[in-house]
């Protein structure tokens, strides 16, 4: 874990434990107080670190990662402060023929 802190100083112990709690990373071994993670988990840690360095809030970063894992890449249905909205989830998007991929008629 100290190597991770050295490579990604924005991601500390608290953030790593939170990522574990959410199931985004997984500890594979614990030796003398150090935690070891899978190589694939380093991509998540790197993504979180880059976003935090860019000034994004941790909650927003985690929502984006969760949405990416669920397959929801482009939409974020936030309900904060809205009582008239109901939660929604995109199940499938169909591309309309003629709107995309068809050449525009110059006349």
Image (cartoon, rainbow, N blue to C red):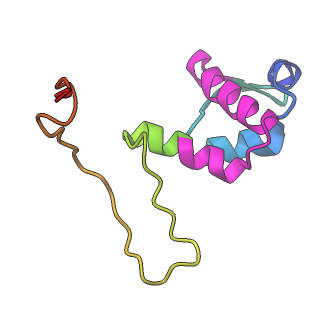
How many numbered marks appear?
0
Q: Quadrant of the N terminus?
A: top right
Question: Residue 65 versus residue 37: which sits nearer the camera?
Answer: 65
Question: Residue 17 versus residue 55: which sits nearer the camera?
Answer: 55
Residue 97 is inside the magenta segment: no
The residue most toward the front is 107
Q: Quadrant of the C terminus?
A: top left
Bounds of the magenta span? Answer: 37-64
Q: Is residue 6 left or right of residue 31?
A: right
Question: Residue 31 versus residue 58: which sits nearer the camera?
Answer: 58
Q: Quadrant of residue 101?
A: top left
Q: Residue at x 78, y 35 (%)?
A: 54
Q: Residue at x 42, y 83 (%)?
A: 84
Residue 54 is inside the magenta segment: yes
The residue most toward the left is 97
Across and down, in percent, residue 12 comes to: 84, 37
Can I make out residue 29 in this image?
A: no
The residue most toward the bottom is 83
Q: Quadrant of residue 93?
A: top left
Question: Residue 76 versus residue 27: which sits nearer the camera?
Answer: 76
Across and down, in percent, residue 23 comes to: 55, 42
Can I make out residue 72 in this image?
A: yes
């Amino acid at each position: 874990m100290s190597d991770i802190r050295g490579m990604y100083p924005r991601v500390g112990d608290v953030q790593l434990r939170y990522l574990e709690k959410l199931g985004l990373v997984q500890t594979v071994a614990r030796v003398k107080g150090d935690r070891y993670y899978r190589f694939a988990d380093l991509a998540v840690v790197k993504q979180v670190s880059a976003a935090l360095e860019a000034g994004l809030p941790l909650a927003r970063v985690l929502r984006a990662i969760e949405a990416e894992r669920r397959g929801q890449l482009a939409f974020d249905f936030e309900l904060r402060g809205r009582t008239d909205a109901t939660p929604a989830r995109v199940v499938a998007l169909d591309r309309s023929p003629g709107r995309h991929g068809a050449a525009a008629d110059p006349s």
